[in-house]
Amino acid sequence: MRAAAIVSVLAASCAAPAHPQRTLTPARGPLPERSNGPVAQTFMVLRPRSAAITAIGDVDLRVQSAYSSIFEVGEGTLGSVSFDGELWRTSAALRTGIGPSTDLEIEVPVLFATSGFLDVFIETWHSILGLPDSGRETRPQFDYDMRVEAGGVEAYSLEGDRLGLCDVPIVVTHCIVDARGASPAVFVQGALELPTGSEERGFGNGAIDWGLGVGIESDLGDWIVGGGLGWTDRQQPSSFARAGLDADDSVAAHASAEWRAQDSWSVLLGLRFENAVTESLEIEELSGEVLELDMGVAIDGCGATRWFVGFSEDLISASGPDFTAFLGFQAGF
């Protein structure tokens, strides 16, 4: 019911009145977030983005950091999942135009996992909002454990208190329909992810993922609404193969809404869905779908700079990060 209400709010934004007397800035959104789960982050997923294409000769730099509290613990007849800790993923992405309607982006992410400090805050937050704690009360606070076992074999383990390079995605985006008048912009994407992260330490999957995507964006004056759909051929890590697990192909979708509240800042909302990494284990903490709500603001800085700040909340308590706070910076050259 909560997810249906959010989708209704995003859809209703399409009916928001425009104000043609104002000179409106280009889109500041959507929030370029992705699921920050321990296993999910080893596979490629196409992030939400604007339909605006970076011009040939221009370079856009985006640095963003997402910090997540995670508690996903479950057991089944085939194995167990124990995700208890906090993840800090930071990336730098460069985007440049390679054609009149095409740009190329390379993102270099790093990850740090730790026992963290947010347990008390998350439990209080869930209590205030009436959200489930998913069994947090059964384990010690500030504990750390990031493992998946299947048939007595370790299928995944993320080494804690170590900074590691993750896999590097390269994405090409081509706008096939420019926004003109009431017509929305439409773009397509192709991507691959290089296996630069250590599979042994849990920072990558040890293989090249590749994927395709399509997106749409409509400018309605004070409001911009959009959405996208992506598919990724997830490659099976060798640790999954040893444990008898299959990596399911990724299907990800998102909807977004931006309210240009003032000439210098916007309110950004997003709803993201990702299917399960694998359904082989039949434990919802790993075999469940992820649905996350993003809420934030984008604020213009000096020159061609912009700041993003906000947070994400999981709407399916068993499968996604409990809470993610993010901060980003963008600059054009």
Image (tube, helix red, strand yellow):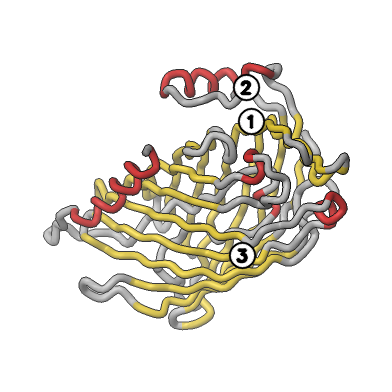
Determine the image quadrant of residue 133. top right
For the N terminus, which image quadrant?
top left
Type of amino acid at the residue the image marks with label 1: Phe
Q: Is residue 60 visible?
A: yes
- Judged from the image, the secondary structure of the residue bearing numbered disc 2 is helix
Can you identify the residue that label 1 sits on?
A: 71
Q: Which of 63/267 is in front?
A: 267
Q: Which of 117/70 is in front?
A: 70
Structural crowding at the residue carrying mark 1, measured as other residues with C-alpha within 10 Å and reported as few (<14), some (14–19) or many (≥20): many
Can you identify the residue that label 2 sits on?
A: 136
Q: CA distance from mark 1 to mark 2?
A: 7 Å
In the image, residue 131 sits, relative to residue 269, either above or below, namely above
Residue 222 location in percent, x, y? 22, 54
Type of amino acid at the residue the image marks with label 2: Arg
**Residues at marks 1 and 2 touching, judged by CB atoms closer than 8 Å:** yes
Can you identify the residue that label 3 sits on?
A: 232
In the image, residue 248 sits, relative to residue 293, either above or below, namely below
